[in-house]
Image (cartoon, rainbow, N blue to C red):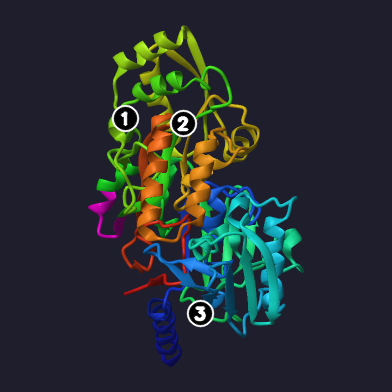
Amino acid sequence: MTYRLWTTAAALAFLAGPALAAQDSITLGMVLEPPNLDPTAGAAAAIDEVVYANLFEGLTRFGPDGSVRPALAESWDLSEDQLTYTFHLRTGVTFHDGTGFDAEDVKFTLDRARAEDSANAQKALFAGITDVRVVDPQTVTVTLSAPDGAFPFKMAWGDAVIVAPESAADLATKPVGTGPFTFAEWVQGDHVTLSAYEGYWGQPPEIATATFRFISDPTAAFAAMMAGDVDAFPNFPAPETLVQLEADPRFKVIVGSTEGETILAMNNRLAPLDNPLVREAVAHAINRQDVIDGAMFGYGTPIGTHFAPHNPDYEDLTALSAYDPDKSRALLAEAGVTDLKLRLALPPPTYARRGGEIIAAQLAQVGIQTEITNLEWAGWLETVFKGRDFDLTIVSHTEPADINIYARDDYYFGYAKPEFVALMEELGRTSNAEQRSALNRTAQRMIAEDFVNGYLFQLAKTGVANARIEGLWENAPTQANDLTAVKWVE
């Protein structure tokens, strides 16, 4: 009898233990699997969604409210001529492989990013740098060719994270950063796992293990949430089920905004889309609200240019490309275009696949036929983004304040109008807030009036999480699943 009482007590204690222990692991769902894990050599948003602020850090970083905050640089100064930034670096910082972080790593990173053979997808961020000098191990100066008040903002991008020469060559599959989490494993096609870094310089995370599971199918994503196979899905791909999830006390639905301008991109290099009349005809054939309702179940804000509606400088230009199929037909006739057939390349996200079917039907109503090709993310990057072998595609540009991409002569949709390039150069030289706002508005109107692309909607951030999870971002000022403040609560 004594033995039986002891074992019963032990069993009760054993059962009580896990219930009292704080939960310190989390599984997050993601629609897309990153093609690699190197944010300094890849354009896919899915890379930053895993590694930004978790595994890698930059001199500065974005906060959840979009503000630029200190990161590896605890402060910085600007010279009187506004050409030289002096960054004062944190002490006691190490990379995950144990090597120390100092000013030499900053110089290596910035010189690597701006080099002629750089593989950085956002090389333009570093184009204004003329010199990087190490003053001492904790101080580095960056000299620019012209004043750039947005330079700390540029250094907060995921493409500008600091890496070490000892590990830079293998970041794609063996990422080594200075962040609060280290790389644990990548089971391709299934998940990436990160573990808390014991040597982290800052506030240690409350999450010990974070697993990012890749679930592209909306039905499977809903099933995974219902079954508890994932704890949170920050960018949930099945908005039609949000009402059901919101009614379930186990979950909370998190709806915010993103930097994602969702566009029907047009290849301005290829005939007949090199003709502004044809591009305008395409734009007027699109009923934005039908796309938002049909593909996103009402989640999304219509846009008429490449700028976020929550930005103070935003100008509503949707009327310039309002839905008008009769005008679309008239413009095609004016351009002398008949029997037009265009290739429509669609990447995996729900907004693209569902939205593409709706837009194809709308274009057909004005006499434009489309040949749809569904591409996986790696194939889209290779064929469309790099190879520019497309007519139309649908993609959400989630980088912050990125209207300057229209000035790049090698960019996939091929605009780079000289007047627009000059406008962006002037914006880069301007630090006065009112003048910058005026230039931003001029830029928005220029690309809208040139009908560079079909502007659809600002992507909403629709997330779902276990009701006990706190600290996930409501909005997405950059493409990230920042876990530094995430925790479970009772």
Asked whether disc 2 touches disc 3, contact meaning CB atoms under 8 Å apart, the reply is: no
The span from disc 2 to disc 3 (Cα, nearest Å) is: 46 Å
* Residue found at the far bottom of this picture: 2
* Closest to the observer, 482 or 122: 122
Residue 234 on the magenta span: no
Q: Amino acid at mark 1?
A: Leu
Q: Is residue 445 visible?
A: yes
Of circles 1 and 3, the one toward us is 1
> Relative to 318, is 19 on the left or the right?
right
> Which quadrant is home to the N terminus?
bottom left
Q: CA distance from mark 1 to mark 2?
A: 12 Å
Q: Position of residue 264 (x, y in %)?
A: 44, 31
Q: Amino acid at mark 2?
A: Val
Give the class, few, some or many, for how many residues have Cα within 10 Å of label 3's Cα (few <14, many ≥20): some
Q: In which image quadrant can residue 187 be found?
A: bottom right
Q: Secondary structure at mark 2?
A: loop
Residue under label 1 = 320
What is the span of residues highlighted in magenta in the rendered image?
Answer: 244-254
- Between 81 and 29, the residue placed more toward the observer is 81
- In the displayed image of the protein, which residue is found farthest to the left? 247
Of labels 1 and 3, earlier in sequence is 3
Disc 2 target residue: 452
Give residue 204's mark: 3
Image point 29% across, 47% down: which residue? Answer: 242
Residue at the location (31% across, 54% down)?
Answer: 312
